[in-house]
Image (cartoon, rainbow, N blue to C red):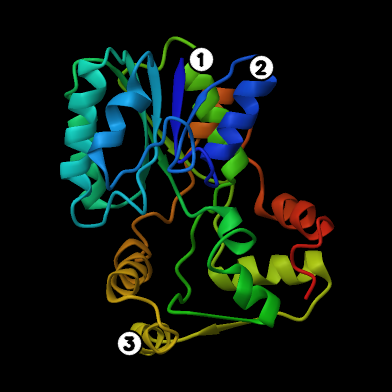
Amino acid sequence: MKLVLGGTGKTGRRIVERLREAGTEPRVGSRGATPSFDWDDPSTWHAALTGVRSVYVSFFPDLAVPGAPEAIEAFTKTAVACGVEKLVLLSGRGEAEARSCERIVAASGVEWTVLRASWFNQNFSENYLLEPVLDGQVVLPAGDVPEPFVDADDIAEVAVAVLTQDGHHEKIYELTGPRLLTFADAVAEIAAASGRSIEFVPVSAAAYATALKEAGLPDDTVSFLIYLFTTVLDGRNSRVEDGVRQVLGRPARDFADYARAAAKTGVWSP
């Protein structure tokens, strides 16, 4: 039995779909599943882990938020006690806070693999950047720092390979796309693919934080987004890695291919 935490999220639902296509019925780790799983309610963990041998660990909202290491440590201990033999952790590139979570999983005493992913392509079509794209104006505190955006489908395919194959113990895979793009570049790719006029507007972090608060976002969400755009997006991750090729033997999906495929679904049609 394989447990996929965040089984209804961007990477988790893709992993679940692929496992089912391969003839394996995984256990979906979410509040709405049976048995349910809730990161904020440790009393749900034991039932979700019973009978499970491999776990895809996707922490919500992110390993960089306060309290994440404590939750990962408690979960890891529970998983090992329940007989789990393999942990596959989704981590973030360049997040010092996430490294402590990686070390906790590596010290678990069971087989482990870390997947360090860059910014998801799908943030533009399935997450907080969709509405700005539909509005025709993407305003972010991101300047000319390039990022190797990675596709969630690539992450899912890598995760399935790691969950179902041997040879990935004690491996850390850096998952990125095949080229560097600034956020302005990415928005331009989306505009070209969708045939729409979409403007990218860089702003200061302070102005962005003010706008988020005025929109009613809670302070912890605002702080986390500012952290991502100011600390993580400072050039530390401006390099392409070959983790996708290492695991799958093929190049990572290009952002332009993602944009064309997403545009065909009509997701960016206002």
Q: Name above or below for residue 226 compared with residue 212.
A: above
The answer to which of 6 and 176 lies nearer the viewer is 6
Task: Check residue 22 in the rendering and tell me which mark sits there, or answer none.
Answer: 2
Label 1: few (<14), some or many (≥20) within 10 Å?
few
Label 2: few (<14), some or many (≥20) within 10 Å?
few
Q: Nearer the viewer, mark 3 or mark 1?
A: 1
- Mark 3 near mark 2, Cβ–Cβ under 8 Å? no
Give the residue at mark 1.
Answer: 164
Query: What's the distance in space between the residues labelled 1 and 2, CA to CA?
Result: 10 Å
Q: Amino acid at mark 2?
A: Ala
Q: Is residue 112 visible?
A: yes
Secondary structure beneath label 1: helix
Q: Name above or below for residue 261 compared with residue 52.
A: below
Give the residue at mark 3.
Answer: 206
Residue at the image point whose x is 32% and y is 87% from the top:
206
Residue at the image point whose x is 15% and y is 43% from the top:
70
